């Protein structure tokens, strides 16, 4: 059991840390040629190193790739317990600015629309996020409206750090060996590209999920298609039967993708095509399309359809050459987690021990955990409490952060008995 005294400490500590962390600019950059993609991510890494030192963790490292590692020794008599890892990411999405975040606490939310001081035409309501109704009476944190909030994933970092503070202050909470890892560039799909697998235990958990009580054990099978259209440039005054306009043809090609299989028309287990970039000119154009499905066979069908379109368009437009490069991104993590069911079972039990409803949730995306699971380290994803990620309306109820911390404490206790 976790006493009210400890719960009060958790709530105060996790909110304080979260408010500090979100004000550090850590937006990643998909177009960068460096790793990490932005130097500002190091600034949060340095802050965490200093705080970890104050919490008496060991083997603390901020490496030259901006990964933070630290080890928490086991409680007395539990040194032989099975180690586990806790993982969260440093960066925030580039979809909305993450610079100069000004967090705002809305005390005892009453159910009315929340307004933003820096964007008067913006509001957050239960219509935007029906889950908000569950948090009437609790404190809600948002940005001031001109940026995202950064709960993805600074809430996860704050929760892990707060639990370390609990273990430091209240030794009655027992745990085996714990390894922490904070990763850069997760938002651009590179969070595990340079991770030191030797620093991680055989079982890990990411804290990168959303609503309170969620446990995510299944994600998309993810591919990417980079399609290059090579046309023929001719002066438009003399172009008849000669000009092959690459970017115009590329637009027609993209329009052939079924609209009902796009992100804005799909949900739950439905996969999609998603055009993420289209650029070029008359002579050459390039399109980037991500392919998503929970079953890899569906993605193979999507690849086959793109290949058929390629052949058709090359016949229709003599002189046109289309090249398609397919990139594998990550697999559905359930494939790997099912082989070690106790990793899932303990997470379920820990959520129930925190006296909240368990919600097994599909990830319509991916996490560091998907890549780690494929690398041989089963890594389910636990909730952090944040909602409407990557938007100006992003919010997090403080009770959700408290409960996420409680889940980690229970999870470590369960593993310490192994």
Image: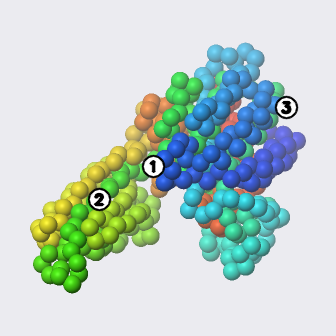
Q: What's the mark number on residue 169?
A: 3
Badge 1: residue crowd in 10 Å (few <14, some 14–19, many ≥20): many
Residue 227 disc label? 2
Rendered image coloring scheme? rainbow
Mark 1 — residue? 219
Residue 153 appears in the figure: no
Q: Residues within 10 Å of mark 3 (few under 14, many from 20)?
A: few
Report the side of 221 relative to 62 (left or right): left
Any mark on residue 396, and which?
none
Q: Residue 17 placed where, x, y %?
A: 78, 47
Residue at 44%, 32% in the rendered image: 375
Q: Residues within 10 Å of mark 2 (few under 14, many from 20)?
A: many
Above or below 336: residue 118: below
Mark 2: secondary structure: strand
Mark 3 to mark 1: distance in Å? 36 Å
Give me the residue at 71% from left, 75% from top: 119
* Mark 3 touches mark 1? (CB < 8 Å): no
Question: Residue 47: percent from the left, percent from the top?
Answer: 75, 40
Marks 2/1: CA distance?
A: 25 Å
- Say whether disc 3 or disc 1 marks the residue closer to the N-terminus: 3
- 5 relative position to 332: left or right: right
Where disc 3 sits, the SS reads: helix
Label 1 element class: strand
Q: Nearer the viewer, residue 107 or 196?
A: 196
Report whether 218 appears left or right of 301: right
């Amino acid at each position: 059991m976790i006493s009210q005294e400890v719960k009060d400490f958790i709530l105060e500590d996790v909110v304080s840390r979260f408010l500090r962390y979100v004000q550090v600019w850590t937006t990643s950059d998909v177009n960068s040629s460096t790793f990490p993609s932005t130097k500002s991510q190091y600034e949060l890494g340095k802050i965490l190193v200093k705080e970890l030192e104050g919490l008496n963790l060991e083997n603390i490292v901020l490496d030259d790739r901006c990964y933070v590692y630290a080890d928490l020794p086991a409680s007395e008599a539990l040194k032989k317990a099975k180690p586990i890892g806790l993982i969260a990411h440093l960066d925030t999405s580039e979809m909305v600015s993450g610079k100069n975040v000004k967090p705002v606490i809305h005390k005892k939310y009453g159910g009315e629309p929340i307004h933003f001081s820096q964007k008067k035409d913006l509001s957050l309501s239960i219509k935007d996020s029906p889950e908000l109704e569950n948090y009437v009476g609790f404190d809600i944190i948002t940005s001031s409206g001109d940026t995202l909030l950064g709960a993805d994933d600074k809430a996860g970092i704050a929760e892990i750090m707060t639990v370390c503070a609990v273990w430091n202050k209240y030794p009655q909470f027992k745990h085996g060996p714990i390894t922490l890892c904070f990763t850069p560039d997760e938002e651009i799909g590179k969070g595990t590209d340079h991770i030191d697998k030797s620093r991680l235990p055989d079982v890990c958990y990411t804290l990168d999920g959303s609503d309170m009580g969620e446990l995510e054990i299944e994600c998309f099978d993810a591919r990417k298609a980079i399609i290059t259209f090579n046309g023929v440039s001719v002066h438009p005054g003399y172009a008849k039967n000669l000009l092959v306009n690459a970017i115009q043809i590329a637009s027609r090609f993209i329009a052939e993708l079924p609209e009902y299989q796009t992100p804005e028309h799909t949900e739950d287990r439905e996969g999609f095509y998603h055009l993420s970039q289209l650029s070029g000119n008359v002579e050459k154009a390039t399109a980037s399309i991500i392919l998503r499905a929970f079953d890899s066979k569906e993605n193979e069908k999507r690849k086959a359809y793109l290949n058929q379109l390629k052949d058709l368009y090359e016949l229709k437009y003599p002189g046109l050459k289309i090249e398609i490069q397919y990139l594998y991104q990550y697999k559905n993590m359930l494939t790997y987690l099912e082989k070690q069911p106790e990793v899932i079972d303990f997470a379920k039990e820990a959520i129930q021990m925190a006296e909240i409803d368990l919600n097994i949730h599909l990830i319509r995306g991916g996490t560091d955990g998907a890549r780690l699971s494929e690398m041989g380290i089963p890594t389910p994803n636990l909730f952090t409490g944040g909602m409407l990620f990557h938007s100006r309306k992003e919010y997090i109820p403080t009770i959700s952060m408290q409960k996420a911390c409680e889940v980690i404490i229970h999870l470590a206790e369960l593993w310490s008995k192994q």
